[in-house]
Amino acid sequence: MKAIIIEDEEIIAQVLQNKIRNADPSIEIIKILPSLKTAKKWFIQNEEPDILFMDIQLSDGVSFELLEHFQLKCPIVFTTAYDEFAIRAFKVNGVDYLLKPVNDEELQKAIDKCRAIVQQQKPVVADITELMHALSHPQLTLKKYKERFVASIRNQWMPIPVAEIAFFVKEELQYIYLFNGERYLLDSGSLDDIEDVLDPDRFYRANRQYIINIDAVRTVKPVENSKLLIRLKAPYHKLEIDMSRERAPVFKKWMGR
């Protein structure tokens, strides 16, 4: 099978290409397209591939615009660092999605699904149309994120507005740290559960231990061993949070939203 990758971050594109080759060596990546403009030009001049891996948010626009210009029938796997496009509901019949950084197991499932569609020769235009309809009516798909958490303090419960939280951390238990320097024990929930109900425009999962608020970030510095070092604003300016450099392009794009 022949595949195209549309991705504006070169490092992410190369990592995805290597992961696809490892997952299925029979897939030939015939082109990596770095922008919406080059993608439109390529599809005008070439036949569509068997599979299309496509980042949603590109430097020069949203890749869904391709679907408005071309009636693509190949299965499409969207890649994104954000949940805001509400495409979980479209993980059927030729529309799939992968959250960055791409998980090997999820990638394998997406490839297997696409292969089955290609072998059955079933067009996916109807699903794309439904997706475009939902995206043009965001009020129908908008995810409602958590507005407050319940903290435990001296055998009492206390509501904490999300806007006051600088970061979440897993120590022996889960804690929230507020911008004013206060720390509270969370009443329940793992970091995975917490991440799922937070607005991804505001909060980022830096590693297995930390979820940080964009307003708490002071600087990010590359360090040895392919790591990034995140430094937070006062009163947490002495705290340093490690993050893998593989996440750097996604994290940089998140910070610049």
Image (tube, grey):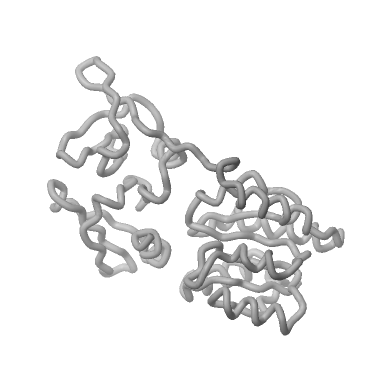
Is there any visible trace of residue 109 in the rendered image?
no
Location of residue 168 with respect to 125 vertically, above or below: above
Residue 204's x, y, as percent?
37, 50
Residue 140's x, y, as percent?
60, 41
Left/right of residue 47 with respect to residue 158 in the rendered view: right
Residue 64's x, y, as percent?
62, 62
Location of residue 199 with respect to 68 vertically, above or below: above
Q: Residue furthest top?
A: 155
Location of residue 155 with respect to 35 vertically, above or below: above
The residue under the point 82% across, 60% down is: 123
Q: Nearer the viewer, residue 68 or 148?
A: 68
Location of residue 141 with respect to 240 vertically, above or below: above
The residue under the point 52% across, 58% down is: 80
Left/right of residue 224 with respect to residue 106 in the rendered view: left
Left/right of residue 85 with respect to residue 183 in the rendered view: right
Viewport quadrant of the N terminus: bottom right
